[in-house]
Amino acid sequence: MAAGKTVSTLCSVDFEVFGKVQGVFFRKYTRINATKHELVGWVMNTPHNTVVGQLQGETANVRLMRKWLRVTGSPKSRIDRCEFKNEKTISVLEFSEFTIKK
């Protein structure tokens, strides 16, 4: 068996967070935490006062970020619920960084 780095599984998932998530730096903290977990993708506010986005990266790190989006959020936010959809295994990342869309 050859020595070397174990191949990690990459995944992608879309999310939408409901609650008090606008005007409380939710997108900024989402980007900080996604970057800390070596994830790429994007986050943005919606017209109906939710935050949506997409996470991509190693499955274990995406799992950690999913928990953060469901439970923690930014310090002044209140998360009522978080929905995840379109989760899939991917072979290559579609983004080079995690960005905040306007």
Image (cartoon, rainbow, N blue to C red):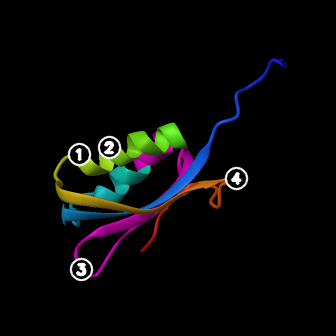
Q: Hey, what amino acid is under mark 2?
A: Lys
Residue where numbered disc 3 is placed:
48
Image-based side of 93 in relation to 33, left or right: right
Q: Which residues are magenta?
A: 32-58
Quadrant of the frame with the C terminus: bottom left
As measured in the structure, the alpha-carbon distance from the residue carrying label 4 to the one carrying label 1 is 29 Å
Please report whichever mark, 2 or 4, sits nearer to the chain's N-terminal start.
Answer: 2
Residue where numbered disc 1 is placed:
71
Residue where numbered disc 2 is placed:
67
Callout 2: SS: helix
Q: Hey, what amino acid is under mark 3?
A: His
Residue situated in front as seen by the camera: 21 or 86: 86
Query: Which numbered dot is residue 54?
Result: none
Residue 58 lies in quadrant? top right
Residue where numbered disc 4 is placed:
91
Q: Position of residue 29 (x, y in %)?
A: 34, 50
Badge 4 crowding class, 10 Å Cα cut-off, few under 14, some 14 to 19, many 20 or more, is few
Identify which residue is drawn at 65% across, 55% down.
93
Callout 4: SS: loop
Residue situated in front as seen by the camera: 49 or 71: 71
Please report whichever mark, 2 or 3, sits nearer to the chain's N-terminal start.
Answer: 3
Check if mark 2's residue and mark 4's residue have beta carbons within 8 Å. Answer: no
Residue 54 drawn above or below residue 40: below
Closer to the eye: label 3 or 4: 4
As measured in the structure, the alpha-carbon distance from the residue carrying label 2 to the one carrying label 4 is 23 Å
Residue 62 drawn above or below residue 5: below
Residue 52 lies in quadrant? bottom left
